[in-house]
C-alpha cells in the first residue's frame, strides 16, 4: 500500500533511549541501539506531515551536538523544519519530574503554526496524587503519609530489562523516594490495610505508579506484577503526550495561536509568519 505523503504524523517515543543516557555514559556512533537511522528511513518512505521523536534529556547535551546537527540536517533534506526542547512532566500536571527530549518536525507550511505547549503553574505532589489509593484498604496512617509525601516524585524508572525490577530505580532514585516516605525497593501487591502501623513506609502498587505517570485509573496493564510495571515505567506520561499532541494537531490544522498574555517567542513566530505572507503577496503582484 502506498502511504507516501498520506500519513499525518509519524511518532515513535523513545526511539534510541538507551543510546544517549548521559555524556559520561555514551556508546559509539555504530551502536545498534541507535534507532534514529531507522526513524529517518521510515520518514523517507512515509513522508508524513509531522514527525515527533522523544528521547532522554542527555541527548540535549553538548556531547551530542554534532549528532543533533546531523539529524536536523537529514530532516531538512527531507523537506522538514524541526525544533527540539526539553519538557518536564511536572510542568504538565504529572506528579514526577521526568524531563524528556522532544523533537518536532513538520513541513514548512505547518511548522510555522507550531508552538510548544505552555507549562501549567500548579504542580502535583505524590501525597495528593495517591492519597485515596493509599487509603483504599483502610490504612489509618494514609493522611499523615500524604503530608510527608509533599513533593513531586523523581523520574519513574525500572521499566526495562536493563534496570531489572520491579522497583523504583537505582540507589539515587530510592533515596529520593525515601525522602517522600516511600520504600522504593520493590512494588507492593496491595495498599496498606487497617492493621498497618501508622508510621509505616509503604511501597507503591503498579496502579499507584501508573497514576504517578498520569495514566487514568481505567487503563489496564496486562501480565504479572513485573510485566505490568515495565509497561508503566517505560511509558511516556499521557498528560505530556496530550499537551504536545494538541500543539501538533493545532499546527496541522493551522489553528491561530490564542495570545492570552505577552510571549516574545510566540509574537516573533507570528511576526515571521505575517512577514512571509506579505512577501508572498508582493511576489504574486510582481508576476501579475
Image (cartoon, grey):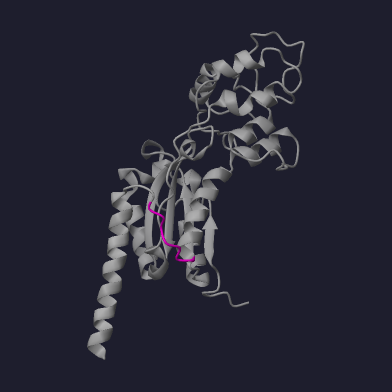
Task: Give above or below for 103 relative to 4.
Answer: above
Majority secondary structure of magenta residues: loop
Q: Quadrant of residue 202?
A: top right
Q: Nearer the viewer, residue 228 or 267?
A: 267
Q: Nearer the viewer, residue 179 or 128?
A: 128
- Which residue is most to the bottom? 288
- Range shown magenta: 253-259
The answer to whether residue 163 is seen in the rendering is yes
Picture quarter with the C terminus? bottom left
Task: Give above or below for 230 relative to 259.
Answer: above
- Which residue is most to the front? 260
Q: Is residue 237 magenta?
A: no
Left/right of residue 181 with respect to residue 194 in the rendered view: left
Q: Is residue 257 magenta?
A: yes
Image coordinates of residue 84 in percent, x first then y, are 38, 52
Q: Residue at x 34, y 63 (%)?
A: 73
Image coordinates of residue 187 in percent, x first then y, are 67, 26
Q: Nearer the viewer, residue 261 or 158?
A: 261
Q: Nearer the viewer, residue 104 or 55?
A: 104
The answer to whether residue 40 is seen in the rendering is no
Left/right of residue 86 with respect to residue 12 in the rendered view: left
Image coordinates of residue 235 in percent, x first then y, are 59, 43
Task: Give above or below for 9 relative to 31.
Answer: below
Picture quarter with the N terminus? bottom right
Q: How many marks?
A: 0
Q: Residue at x 41, y 58 (%)?
A: 257
Image coordinates of residue 193 in percent, x first then y, are 76, 16
Q: Residue at x 58, y 25 (%)?
A: 128
Q: Residue at x 25, y 86 (%)?
A: 285
Amino acid at each position: 500500500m502506498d502511504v507516501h505523503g498520506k500519513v499525518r504524523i509519524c511518532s515513535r517515543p523513545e526511539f534510541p533511549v538507551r543510546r544517549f543516557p548521559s555524556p559520561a555514559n555514551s556508546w559509539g556512533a555504530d551502536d545498534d541501539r541507535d534507532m534514529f537511522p531507522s526513524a529517518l528511513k521510515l520518514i523517507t518512505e512515509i513522508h508524513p506531515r509531522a514527525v515527533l521523536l522523544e528521547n532522554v534529556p542527555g541527548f540535549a547535551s553538548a556531547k551530542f551536538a554534532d549528532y543533533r546537527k546531523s539529524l536536523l540536517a537529514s530532516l531538512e533534506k527531507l523537506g522538514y523544519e524541526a525544533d527540539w526542547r526539553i519538557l518536564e512532566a511536572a510542568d504538565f500536571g504529572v506528579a514526577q519530574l521526568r524531563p524528556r527530549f522532544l523533537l518536532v518536525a513538520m513541513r514548512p507550511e505547518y511548522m510555522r503554526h507550531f508552538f510548544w505547549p505552555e507549562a501549567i503553574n500548579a504542580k502535583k505532589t505524590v501525597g495528593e496524587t495517591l492519597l485515596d489509593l493509599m487509603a483504599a484498604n483502610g490504612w489509618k496512617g494514609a493522611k499523615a503519609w500524604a503530608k510527608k509525601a509533599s513533593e513531586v516524585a523523581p523520574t519513574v524508572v525500572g521499566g526495562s530489562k536493563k534496570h531489572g525490577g520491579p522497583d523504583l530505580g537505582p540507589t539515587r532514585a530510592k533515596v529520593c523516594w525515601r525522602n517522600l516516605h516511600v520504600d522504593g525497593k520493590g512494588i507492593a501487591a496491595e495498599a496498606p490495610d487497617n492493621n498497618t502501623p501508622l508510621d509505616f513506609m509503604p511501597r507503591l502498587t503498579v496502579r499507584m505508579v501508573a497514576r504517578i505517570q498520569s495514566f487514568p485509573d481505567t487503563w489496564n496493564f496486562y501480565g504479572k506484577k513485573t510485566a505490568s510495571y515495565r509497561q508503566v515505567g517505560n511509558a511516556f506520561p499521557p498528560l505530556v503526550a496530550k499537551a504536545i499532541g494538541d500543539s501538533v494537531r493545532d499546527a496541522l490544522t493551522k489553528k491561530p495561536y490564542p495570545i492570552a498574555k505577552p510571549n516574545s517567542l510566540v509574537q516573533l513566530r507570528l511576526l515571521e509568519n505575517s512577514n512571509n505572507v506579505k512577501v508572498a503577496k508582493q511576489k504574486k503582484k510582481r508576476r501579475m
